[in-house]
Image (cartoon, rainbow, N blue to C red):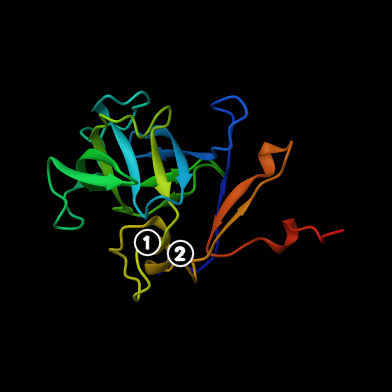
Amino acid sequence: MKAARKYDFPLHSGILPDDWLYYGTFYVGSTPDKVNLLFTSLTDWTVIAAYNCANCDNKQYNYEISETNRRGQGNVYYSEKSWLEVDGFNLTGFSSRDTICSERRGGECVGSPGPEFFTVTSDPQKFLGLFSGVIGLIPASDAPLSPSDISLIAYLRGRGYTENSQVSVLLRQGNATQSSVIFGGYDETRLYPNK
């Protein structure tokens, strides 16, 4: 078990002019493949487009050559050619587990085999848009958490990476390098008193 702490992921924006869409840059698999994942409160799932995804605009993750990929070892109700609904959008794909690394501090990595996520092979309604996928910010459930829970938040807590399921978002106008999402707490040193 790792010492519980906070995971601080840098946020970026500006894929679209004047947007309020915030994403993080991650590296998935043993290759590793660079992906831009949108943070969203629409789901508890992490969703990543496969390199062969039909109708996906931004697809880099090659699960077939990743030596750390554990395909189909997650929830039994998600299997090959299954589907996932996110806010009315239907995605086709399958459940996977693989290593996910942050861009910060030399590529801090989570897991082996890593958290569960949904690998998208078809996105007919263009849910992912210009992104490689999404990271859901909803905890999977209020029940006691286990390492097999599907949300990244639940995975981090269940494996002892964080002490709790708290998520905080710090947005710094005009200074994108200081904007971040923190799993497992918040950073008091970056808060300013109201004036």
Q: Which mark is residue 155?
A: 1
Q: Badges 2 and 1: C-beta atoms under 8 Å apart? A: yes
Instruction: Residue under label 2, please give it.
Output: 161
- What is the quadrant of residue 155 in the picture? bottom left
Q: Which mark is residue 188?
A: none
- Residue 160 vs 59, above or below: the answer is below
Nearest to N terminus: mark 2 or mark 1: 1
For this view, does 154 lie left or right of residue 74?
right
| Label 2, residues with CA under 10 Å away: few <14, some 14-19, many ≥20 | many
Q: x and y percent of residue 101 in the render? A: 44, 44
Q: Residue at x 34, y 75 (%)?
A: 143
Q: Residue at x 29, y 31 (%)?
A: 125
- What is the quadrant of residue 161 in the picture? bottom left
Report the residue that reaches farthest toward the bottom. 144
Q: Residue at x 39, y 56 (%)?
A: 152
Q: x and y percent of residue 108 in the render? A: 49, 48
Q: CA distance from mark 2 to mark 1?
A: 8 Å
- Residue type, mark 1 in image: Tyr
| Label 1, residues with CA under 10 Å away: few <14, some 14-19, many ≥20 | many
- Residue type, mark 2 in image: Tyr
Position of the N terminus, as image quadrant, is bottom left
